[in-house]
Amino acid sequence: MKRICLLGAAVAAVLILGVASAMAASSHASNGGTKSKTPSTVTTKVSCAASLILQVAPGATDVTPAAQDGTQMGPVACNTGKGVEWESFSTEDSGDITGKWQAWFNAGSVYGTFTLTPDDTSPPTTTTSFSQASYTGTFAVKNGTGAYAKATATGTLKCSTKDAVHFSCKQAGKVTLPAPATTKKG
């Protein structure tokens, strides 16, 4: 259960960073020479890889692997840029991990939700342990700030951990942002 929670957070972080970077790249495109108008939307594919680490809980003096809820942080690298992500997660009775995340980039931040389901449902073997786990899930971008204001996105997540503290996540999806307004030469 703890492994699932941690992985979910890592996956969410990856997705958030990728979406935010894609949004910044799309929102900075210019069309030099047309009159301001109601912006249409720009949709961009994004893929990211994140390395998240379980954070020490408030009031605790060390990390508790396989925690049922908590927070994770770490760097994210996407096809559109790099940033930092934070997420909070909790483990549902079903074993799924759900949570919220936020990622910060030079041009702004993005935030949303995620859900992860454990891929591993059998007990550990002689070559695996309770600390090893993998997860598959989805993410959503609900909004953002700066260049990512009004961003939305959905996508897939895939995460794994060998120690229930350090998570590696890969994410892919599509981010939609309002296209930047353009101005007419005058």
Image (cartoon, rainbow, N blue to C red):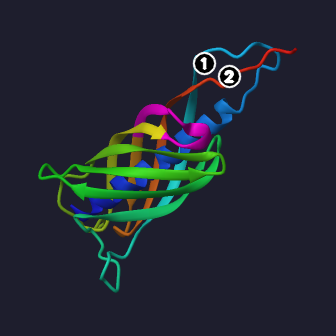
Quarter of the image holding residue 29?
Answer: top right
What residue sits 36% from the left and 76% below the top?
56
Say if residue 76 shows up in the picture: no
Quadrant in the picture for the N terminus: bottom left
Q: Is residue 36 above or below residue 89?
A: above
Where disc 2 sits, the SS reads: loop
Type of the residue with mark 1: Pro
Where disc 1 sits, the SS reads: loop
Q: Is residue 46 magenta?
A: no
Q: Is residue 147 magenta?
A: yes
Given contact means CB atoms under 8 Å apart, are the residues at marks 2 and 1 in contact? Answer: yes
Q: Is residue 174 above or below residue 93?
A: above
Residue 142, numbered label: none
The residue positioned farthest toward the bottom in the image shown = 61
Q: Is residue 133 above or below residue 181?
A: below
Q: Nearer the viewer, residue 82 or 105?
A: 105
The image position of residue 48, as x and y in percent, is: 55, 45
Q: Is residue 157 left or right of residue 17?
A: left
Q: Nearer the viewer, residue 170 or 107?
A: 107
The image position of residue 39, as x and y in percent, is: 60, 18
The magenta segment: 144-156
Residue 181, numbered label: 2
Type of the residue with mark 2: Ala
